[in-house]
Image: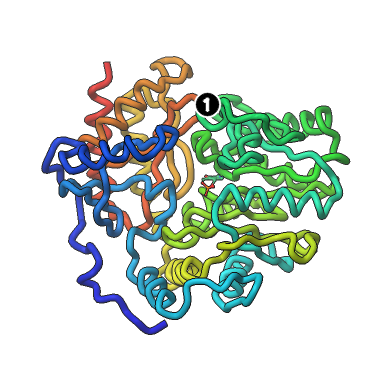
Amino acid sequence: MTSVLPSTDLATDLTGRRIVTEVPGPRSLALHERRLAAVPVGVSSMLPVYIARAHGAVVEDVDGNRFIDLGAGIGVTTIGHTDEAVVAAARAQLGDFLHTLFTITPYESYVRVAELVAERTPGSFAKKTVLVNSGAEAVENGVKIARKATGRRAVAVLEHAYHGRTNLTMAMNYKASPYGLGFGPFAGDVHHAPSSYPYRDGLTGAEAAARTIGHLEKHIGAEDLAILVVEPIQGEGGFQTPADGYLPALQRWANEHGVVIAADEIQSGMGRTGAWFASDHFGFEPDLVFFAKGVAGGLPLAGVTGRAEIMDAAQPGGLGGTFGGNPVAAAAAVAVIERIEEQGLLAEGRRIEATLRPALEDLQRDFPVIGDVRGIGAMLAIELVQPGTKEPYPAAVATVSAYAGQHGVLLLTAGTWGNVLRFLPSLAITDEQLLDAVSVIREGLATLP
Ligand SMILES: *Cc1c(COP(=O)(O)O)cnc(C)c1O
């Protein structure tokens, strides 16, 4: 682990937005034509500009246009694109070995990731970790493990949830379109319970939890429920942030009834919210934590960390997979976690919120189309509604996000009704870049009728 990347290889000259062609430009359009012939339409792209280089919070396309990246590949490059320590760790591993398969002949970095994540997930109990390739695969494994540990059948999730695109996780998603439509039949025994969505339900945490629990007891029965999976802050659903007390009340109920309670922290975890895991903000100690997206700086890695006695329920050979915990991805993950610690990057999530939230609240004062500003740390969102109502206004989101793309800002959408703009910048974004991006969003909002 000695080779250090010469910094001239990193695109450190990328510091701000710069638009030099139409967006998409001619080279992107030419690539897009090839792509349309070669890649199915089911794999869509929000903005078909083809990326050539990236660093920190800026990406550059093949036409030389530069974009301030408010999405970080959906919260993956959490510590910034091409962080030099992460790139160096991956490069060093590339020269040592690329693959052995941990279930044939193991290696240290897998174990190190397991130790580092266990120390940082909520709860001081003994924990173990299995590494896999994708978020959906982590969710699948969490459900397998919980069923084996409890001997029970049913799976419960919350309204507005998103958990992935595999067969089981399609059944766990709230939104049929586009994630499930036409792809059934789906896995059985997956049940959707009401969530906490303070902007729309007006309930306290205790009231919302009573509603969720009442639904689970009536609809499934605690004694048949293996696992309840919740996103502490919902991702694709629109960054719904539960009312205080909601998650601890679900936890108490689950603990009392022998139900495994799992936090899907795939989008909200790994330093995204100014804490290691969003659960930390709510006093929530889940039995299992699912992580993926931000853990390895852009390389594919995911996992389940949880109570040792639950994790050990699966028989030898019952967990694993060819690429799970790939050595390069695991080396990158160790570097990401050490980097967050050494550079105090959790504070950057709080700094981003301190800059971005007031800027978004200013926008809300000027544009009544913004119904709600919510989220924590570098995971904030605005929900757009028809002014004076709470009626979702997805056309406004589409307009503002398209305007942003044209003017050098990558801005992601979300929400059950497609009416949420979400901000998931990397922790490397500067206040100047953030405020510049907000000024573009202000212009975009001003174009609304
Ligand atoms: C992205 C996401 C997933 C699925 O992860 P993949 O790596 O895309 O399979 C699951 N849950 C949440 C909360 C996510 O944001």
Left or right relative to 141: residue 75: left
Find residue 254 and report its horizontal and vertical position in percent. Answer: 79, 45
Count all numbered tags in the image, as a single digit: 1
Q: Residue 418 appears in which quarter of the rendering?
A: top left
| Amino acid type, callout 1 | Ser
Q: Which residue is mark 1?
A: 177
Would residue 407 be seen by someone viewing this image from the given angle?
A: no
Q: Position of residue 221 (x, y in %)?
A: 85, 34
| 316 to 244, vertically: above or below | below
Q: Residues within 10 Å of mark 1 (few under 14, many from 20)?
A: few
**Residue closest to the far left:** 20
Residue, x 42% and y 82% (percent of image)? 1
Q: Residue at x 40, y 22 (%)?
A: 394
Quarter of the picture containing the C terminus is top left
Q: Residue furthest bottom?
A: 2
Q: Quadrant of residue 193?
A: top right
Q: Residue at x 22, y 51 (%)?
A: 60
Is residue 198 depicted above or below 143 in this figure? Answer: above
**Front one among 286 and 90:** 90
Q: Between 17 and 332, which is closer to the camera in this rendering?
A: 332
**Is label 1 in a helix, a strand or a loop?**
loop
Q: Is residue 238 left or right of residue 71?
A: right
89 in relation to 398, above or below:
below
Tell me the colour scheme of the image. rainbow
Q: Position of residue 176 (x, y in %)?
A: 57, 27
Find residue 41 and report its horizontal and vertical position in percent. 40, 32
